[in-house]
Structures are given as C-alpha cells and as structure tokens.
Amino acid sequence: MRLLREELVSRRPEEVNFLFEIEPILLSRDEEGAYLILPFLIGEIIDYDLCAVFSWDSDEEGLTLRTIEGGKGIWPSKPLSNGIAASALQSVEPIYIPDLTRYEGDPYPFGREMKSILAVSMRSYGYPVGVIQVGSKRTNAYSDDDLELARIFGVKAAHSILHLRQIPTPSDYFDPITRTYRYPVFLDHLRKEINFSRRNKIPASLIYIDLDRFDEFNRSYGYKVGDRILREIASKIMESIRAEDSVCRYGGDEFLVLLTKADRDGAIRVARRVQDRIGDEDTYPSLTIGVATCPEDVDHPETLVNLARKAMERGKEMGGNTIQTPSESDLRGLVELFRVKPPLGYSRTNAWDSLTDEFLWLALTMLTQALLVERASLMILDPKENLLKFEVTKNLDESVRRKVKVRMGEGIAGRALLEGKAIWADDIMRVGVSAGNGRGYRSNSFICAPILKGELRIGVINLTDRSNGRPFSEHEERIVEEFAAVIAETMTDMR
C-alpha cells in the first residue's frame, strides 16, 4: 500500500501538490463558506458531473445535504440512514460504485443518469464531519488513484472544518469566573511568544500556579465563596505582572502565567511577588508554583507547560506553598505527549503516511523544537538487509534521504545501534568513526541515539546543526535517550 501511494506522487504530481493547498483555502473562510467551496476544490483533482457535500448533524445523528454542484433544480432534504453517503460515513475507505445499474441502494441526491459514484467520508481524528460524493455519467470513471486522492482530500477537508468550528468567538476568549484567558487562546499567545523567543534569542517564562487544598476550601466555605476567591486571586495575579504578560485559568484551581522577555530568575521573582500578595490574605489558600523557561528548559509550547506542571507537582509532594523549577526528575515530562499515538490523517508533508510514519514525524518534530535542532533524522533498521534507512527527516537533502543506507556497525548510526549506546560529541571529528562527509554537517553539535526495546534493535535518532550553535550537554543526551525509549515502546506496541 505504501508503494502505491508513493507512485501516486509520480503519476499525479499536480493533484498531489494541490492537496496541500486545500487547508489554507478552507481556513480563510467560515464553516458555511468552506462547505460551499468544497465541490470546486475536489474538482481540481477529480473529474465529475455532479458533486454533493453533506455535513454530519450529531444532534439528529444524520447527514444533511449542504450543497450540490453540476446540476439544476431543487433537491429535497431527507434523513439519511442508508445509501451511498451513509455507507461512506461509516467507512475509512472511499465507497466506489463503478456501475450504478448494478447497485440497488439509494444514490441520493443523484439520479440514475449517473453511471459511477464515488463517496468519501470527512473525518478528523475519528470524529465524523460529513461526506463528499461525486458522480460521473461514465461507467468505471474512477481509478485507484482517484480513490486515494479523494480519501486524502476528505481527511484534509475534515481537519479544516473541525478547526473552523473551534476558532474562538469573542465570548469564548475569557473564563466566565476569573475573566482570564481560556487555554486555547492562551496557547496561541504562548506559541507566538516562543516563536519570537526562538527568532530573537530572548527568553520567555511560564509560571504554573496551583491553589493548595482548594477542594477542602470549597467544601468548608461553599462553591460561591470559592468562585469569589478564584476571581480575587486571578485579580492579584494580574496586578503582579506587566500589561504584555498573559494569564489563563487552566483548570478548576490552576492558573498559567506567560511572562514575555523574562528569564528564569525574573520569573521566580514574579512568582514570589504573587505568593506574597496572596499570602497577605489570611482567608486565601497558599500557592504551589512551577516555573519553566524557554529556551533554557525547552523550546516547545505544550512541553513548556508540561515541565512547569511537573515542577509544580514536585512542590506539592514537598508539602506545597513553594516555588520549584524543572529538575532531572522532570525529564519524563518531555515525553508524556508521545504516550498518545496520533491517528491516521495527521497533517504531514507526504500524502502516503502510515500510522507509524505519523508517530515518528511527530516525535522528531517535537524533539527538534525542544532542543533547537535544525537538521535531524530517524533511521529504521531493515532486519532483512541489516541496513538502516531514513524514515523521517528534517532539512535533509532528498537525494541523501533516498540513497543513503547504513550497514549495522558502520558509521556513527550503525555503531550506535550495534553498541546500544548514544554517540555524541562537541566535535564530530573526535568520534573516531566516519560521520558521512556527504551529509554536509555545518556545526560541531552532533548526537546519535539508538532506539532499542530490550535486545530488539529498531533504529537511531540523529540530531545535528543546532540553531544556537551550542554543543549538546549530558543533560540533553538523557532527554534524547528518553525520547528513544518511548519511541521504541510505542513502535513495538504498533507491530
């Protein structure tokens, strides 16, 4: 199946390229506008005489006809519990009727003048969004390539429409009790600030605040008093920070604070100021606070939140009412995000990805962002040929990705996997094995970590060319090894 999809790129390059233009086009519209333009977009990759678009109504548990293109007249709306569109909604693969004269079901909204019908579900992470159905007046009108293009189109359309539904309206920006940001809005601020921090080499910090024993407080004084205290604490937090900083109510009794242009020491000072303001009130609960800084700790939004939370939880274990920063014991906070495997359809730069490819791509992307790595790759061992082959790459020349294979025990990657331990150096010439001069490494930073599960050799992680120019530290080597362990665990679960 993978071979077929790769060949699709060579057979239908224009259509495959257009698939990656779909999401920006759809996201520039509202949801209704997205449904209306879908027939024109799919017409760029598949010929049809009629095209119908249905949306899934979760309340009515049925499909609703949203638009139809290519015909004249009025199509009456009716509940769909069977027929081609309903069947397509339940299927991860397209439903194709090459000869409608041999089909006894309901081709609604098409008539029998259509000879071939192709229907594909729009699903995002398993959630049904709708169905796209195209028809041709020719029998056997659609090829296997058409079916694969339609399937990918359906996934990308579903991602976009679901995203449009989740874009906050003004009333969704703020928590109704504390009037602080909701998390999705706050996360958008955090991503932008980290991007700014990365580009300009200016630190930014995150404070994770948890109210100590607030459940007991609620039980003693009641939830109305608890809500009032939450509002007052949120107000005191905002009084303690600058106008350009942001506050978010993250959970029932948790707050996140984004401090722009603040290093770790500055963030700790702010955390102490918040604690002092809250501590002045005898009726308020005390605070346990975790602090994490970009890029000193990590360089990824969700991971920064995760590390600050880990530091806060360690403070809770120490009895609370304290301020903590990330430590060696918090390294697993970097890899928890990989415990959940991404579903099929995760946005990629390739049109033929399998579940394993998507997981590896996500893992490599987050690792490179966390460690400021410009070039990276994941190589997987082919046990039959005993060769390491590139599976996922970042900023690696395509000709290298396709041609280069490493035999077990040869080169840095082969040696790391054979010996079962990471090879890292501030100068790759000191490693004592060939680093592969043709790869064009530009910096003195290099690390290669094996991916192992017991005695099973799976592959290696290669990282090089850091954007900050620094060599990898022993602390960062352990981070890479943690990632490799989780990748190994997850990949063996997938097999």
Image: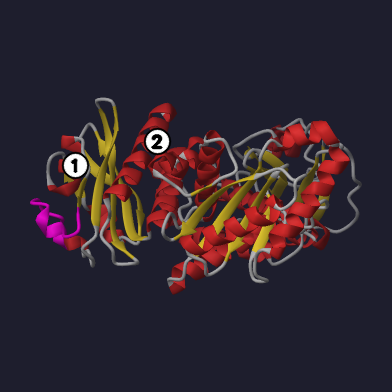
Dot 2 surroundings within 10 Å: few (below 14), some, or many (20 or more)? Answer: many
**Drawn side of residue 145 relative to residue 117, left or right:** left
Q: Do the residues under discs 1 and 2 have CB atoms within 8 angstroms?
A: no
Which of disc 2 and disc 1 is earlier in sequence?
1
Along the line of sight, which residue is nearer the eye, 65 or 309? 309
Q: Is residue 122 visible?
A: no
Q: Outermost residue, top direction?
A: 455
- The magenta stretch spans residue 430: yes
Classify mark 1: residues with Cα within 10 Å, few (<14), some (14-19) or many (20+). many
Quadrant (top left/top right/bottom left/bottom right) for the C terminus:
top left
Residue 478 in picture, x, y percent from top left: 31, 43
In the image, is 472 to the left or to the right of 22? left
The amino acid beneath tag 2 is Val
Residue at the image position 26 percent from the left and 38 percent from the top: 381
Q: Which region is colored magenta?
A: 425-437
Expressed as whole percent of the image width and height from the top left, the position of residue 271 reads: 58, 56
Furthest-bottom residue in view?
Answer: 200
* Residue receiving disc 2: 486
The CA distance from mark 1 to mark 2 is 18 Å
150 relative to 33 in the view: left or right: left
Relative to 377, is 67 on the left or the right?
right
Q: Which residue is mark 1?
A: 416
- Provide the secondary structure element on which disc 2 rests: helix
Looking at the rendered structure, the secondary structure element under dot 1 is helix
Q: Nearer the viewer, residue 328 or 214?
A: 214
* Snapshot quadrant of residue 9: bottom left
The main secondary structure of the magenta stretch is: loop
Q: How is the image coloured?
A: secondary structure
Residue type (three-letter) at the residue carrying disc 1: Ala
Point out residue 388 in the picture as x, y percentages from the top left corner. Answer: 23, 42
Which residue is at a point 43% across and 27% down the rendered structure image?
Answer: 493
Q: Quadrant of the image for the N terminus?
A: top left
